[in-house]
Amino acid sequence: MIRPWEASPTAEFKRRLGKSASELGTTNSSPSCPDIWELDNGDFAVVGRDLTSAYTGRLPTDVSVAPDERIVIIPRVTLIAARSDIPHA
């Protein structure tokens, strides 16, 4: 089946949305996840914890996760810090 959207494996990281994990205090000593990045093709990359198996059995009826998709969890503070950087259109 052809999907109307596919993630591009060749897109490059363009800019961070919000603040780094270090700035937000959501990491210890390394600048590791969580993070949100805009890609050069306009899509977004989210770095977080893969909790797909923990959520799969209790998804809302209108949510599905394809075999090549994951449920990624990020802290609330990460998304809130990115709010002003998210394009409106």
Image: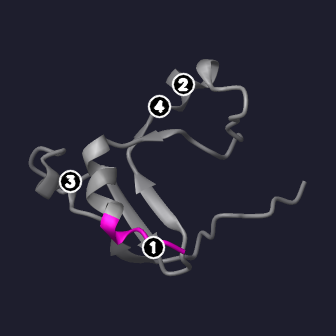
Residue at which label 1 appears: 87
Residue at 18% x, 44% y is 26
Q: In this view, does 77 lie above or below 41?
A: above
Disc 3 residue type (three-letter): Ala
Q: How far apart are marks 4 and 1 (CA)?
A: 27 Å
Q: Which of labels 4 and 1 is toward the front?
A: 1
First of labels 2, 1 by sequence position? 2
The part of the image, by quadrant, that contains residue 28 is top left
Q: Is residue 45 above or below residue 56?
A: below
x, y percent for residue 9: 59, 69
Q: Are marks 2 and 4 in contact (CB under 8 Å)?
A: yes
Q: Nearer the viewer, residue 53 or 87?
A: 87
| 29 lies left or right of 75 | left
Q: Give yes or no for residue 62 being in the magenta stretch.
A: no
The C terminus, quarter of image: bottom right
Residue identified by numbered label 2: 55
Left or right of 15 on screen, residue 8: right
Residue range of the region highlighted in magenta in the rendering: 84-89
- 60 shown above or below 26: above
**Cα–Cα gap, marks 3 and 4:** 19 Å
Task: Give the CA separation, mark 2 to mark 4.
Answer: 6 Å
Mark in front: 2 vs 1? 1
Q: Name the residue under label 3.
A: 21
